Amino acid sequence: MQYEGVLTKMQTEIVDEVQYYLVWKKDFVNLNQLIGKKISINFLKFECLNCGLEKKIFRQGYCYDCWSSIPSAGDWIMRPELSKAHLDEEDRDLEFEKRAQLQPHVVYLANSSDVKVGVTRKSQIPTRWIDQGAHEAIEIVEVPNRYLAGITEVALKDHVSDKTNWRKMLTNEIVDLNLAEEREKLKDFIPEEVQQYYLRNQTELEIKFPVKEFPKKIKTLNLAKNPFFEGVLSGIKGQYLIFENGTVFNVRGHEGFVVDLKVLS
């Protein structure tokens, strides 16, 4: 079997364990079915996810010109506390920013390597947790806009990390915790204007990933430096493909790369 397309982050659905899909314009691949099989990945060219031109990818699947101008790559994406649509103030495109920012957002705890705090749109749960490789997660607050979620995250990250140790996540160096208890420890640090949105009754979600064997040592595959790779797929976690020789491939980190994918055996 052979497939070709521009990489975007893997789409997922949660059943007994997470199902992963590469979705392209004319085809899709259920990657779970390839676990245990030898596959090859061949980098062909770049294709910006916004303008569609063959230009070097700068960040988030976009060429530099698009990344520095389009509203979906504004600073408030990575730093939600910078959101201003609730004030009717424009960053790059107020109409877009209102649609994205003025909707329910959740501040959560996710445990993928250690417990971290994060922000996502309510509609992205549990997708966001899956993308981070979290084996358990729980909501802290649900607020009506991105700004309130952002200032809550800023307040809480003085007391809990806001980063994922992706190496520990991929080697499965995990500890199971009672996230409801961890949430309760943080309650008093939530900003006063957000206290009313505290979710004391939400229970944690446990997530299982399709991995036959976790690597002991990790080697990262960068297609810009090494455009061809082949190996036996042993699992998928977060947005990473894990191969038997310890090589891991960050699919989301290669958005905008056009690849040829072959199933060899």
Image (cartoon, helix red, strand yellow):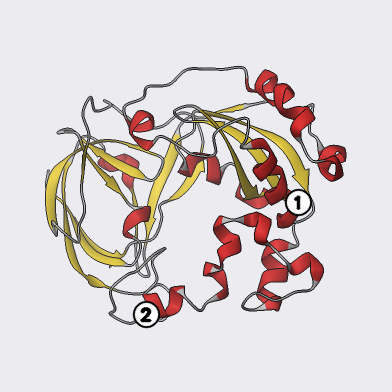
Label 2 residue SS: loop
The picture quadrant where one finds residue 3 is: bottom left
Check the image and report above or below for 47 versus 229: below
| Of pointers 1 and 2, the one earlier in the residue sequence | 2
- Residue 46: image location, x then y, percent: 26, 72
Asked whether the beta carbons under mark 1 and mark 2 sit within 8 Å of each other, the answer is: no
Mark 2, residue position: 52
Q: Is residue 202 visible?
A: no
Check the image and report above or below for 117 versus 30: above
Q: What residue sits 85% from the left and 40% below the top? A: 192
The numbered dot on residue 22 is none
Which amino acid type corresponds to the residue marked 2 in the rendered image?
Answer: Gly
Categorize mark 1 by other alpha carbons within 10 Å: few (<14), some (14-19), many (20+): many
The picture quadrant where one finds residue 199 is: top right
- 260 or 107, which lies in front? 107
Give left or right: position of 121 versus 134.
right
